[in-house]
Amino acid sequence: MADAASRLTALAEALLGEPLPVRIRGWDGSESGPPDGPVLVIRHRRALRRLLWKPGELGLVRAWVAGEIDVEGDLYDVLDRLAGLLWERGADAKDPVRPVRDPRVRAFARGLVELAGPWPAPRPPAEEVRRRSGPLHTRRRDKEAISHHYDVGNDFYALVLGPSMVYSCAYWEDGGTLEDAQRDKLDLVCRKLALKPDQRLLDVGCGWGSLAIHAARAYGVRVTGVTLSQEQAAFARKRIAEEGLTDRIEIRVQDYRDVRDGPYDAVSSIGMAEHVGSVRYREYADALHALLKPGGRLLNHQIARRPEKDEDAYRIDEFIDAYVFPDGELAPVGRTLSILEEAGFEARDVEAIREHYALTLRRWVANLERHWDRAVRATSPGRARVWRLYMAASALSFEHNRIGVNQILAVRPLDSGAARMPLRARTWTEPAGG
């Protein structure tokens, strides 16, 4: 195939009606496009067949995960340049491909057929989740989804997350390290919950035990952590034993819906509620409300999407659903607040920390790239490529305000009325005599 890059560039520019913002290098060694831009490398024409069979984001992602396309240069720059073409174009601002009746689309498809070669549909990469059926967010289905994401391997996550082993947004000060920022986030959560010695804390979605360890060590509380990941639980228990905190922390492999030993003085849910789903969110809020004692505090740390003009038209991201968070859903922060209030909580504070997550993700990507060979050995080349793309694209989404992340502090009111809180905003300890 002679000069594949020039032919692809011509096809793409005819479809888009504007120059391509990246340079293309074809599988035949040919190049075309801006001489000073980053390079999108198409290593195999099978990538084009993937795009023909699954136009748009998912076809490109399958080619990326399979190693059939790659990037030379700054990955963030390439994603930024392509974002407007892939995610912000289309007839309804959702579909990245114009309707098939558009003659430019038909011409583009014919050109790809000529370049792509034999027609059988390529099988999706092994890392893709198989199509699911049945009701969303049953206990079994949620456990399978969590296993897909979190049971990738503790060694892999240790390379990406660093010594803190915290897989949620850090809280940054200028010039601090990732470990400093994660410690500060854990302490911020504990202060917002106003933890005191010998209180009971329920950590829903406890991960590798970092918050539980910090709360027990620094605040003297007794912690119950629940997770659906066997690998997380095993890692957390080992850390807790090494810290000498087994008398203060219990880690369970348990669904939050099955926790029955309340009431707790405080509940933390850090980066877990994204897995709950809209069909179960009221059940989630009711369950946490029931597990808190009157006057107890909930800290809900959760990624949020922007509201849609037509909420009924909202679609889950295909890449995220197929490769990263099966069945995961994002909701606008206003909807989350409303449901928590409907369940009986009093919302006391919302802190938006969107910029902090962009910084966190860029550090995780840097860790992954620095330890690339070890990360590949710990999982697979495809899985490592999934995480690199997912985290880099997510960093840009936070930077461009496509998604946000918020800490919501809520209180279960006392039976006699409102719980007492500090008069000054964001002074998290209780008032004197409280």
Image (cartoon, grey):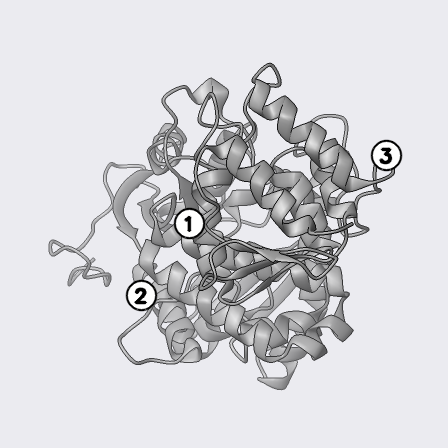
Q: Which residue is mark 2?
A: 191
Along the line of sight, the residue nearer the viewer: 263 or 209: 209
Q: Quadrant of residue 402?
A: top left
- Residue 205 locus on image (x, y percent): 57, 55
Between marks 2 and 3 in the image, the one whose residue lies nearer the viewer: 3
Amino acid type at circle 1 is Ser
Q: Earlier in the sequence, mark 3 or mark 1?
A: 3
User: Is residue 140 in view from this perspective?
Assistant: no
Vertical comparison of 244 with 89: above or below: below
The kind of residue tagged 3 is: Trp
Classify mark 3: helix, strand or loop: loop
Label 3 and label 1: CA atoms lie apart by: 35 Å
Q: Residue furthest front?
A: 2
Question: Which residue is tagged 3?
Answer: 119
Disc 2 to disc 1, how far (Cα)? 29 Å
Counting other residues with Cα less than 10 Å from the Cα at mark 1, is it few (<14), some (14-19), or many (20 or more)?
Answer: some
- Between circles 2 and 1, the one closer to the viewer is 1
Q: Residue at x 37, y 65 (%)?
A: 190
Left or right: 420 with respect to 193? left
Number of the label disc, if any, that sits on residue 397: 1
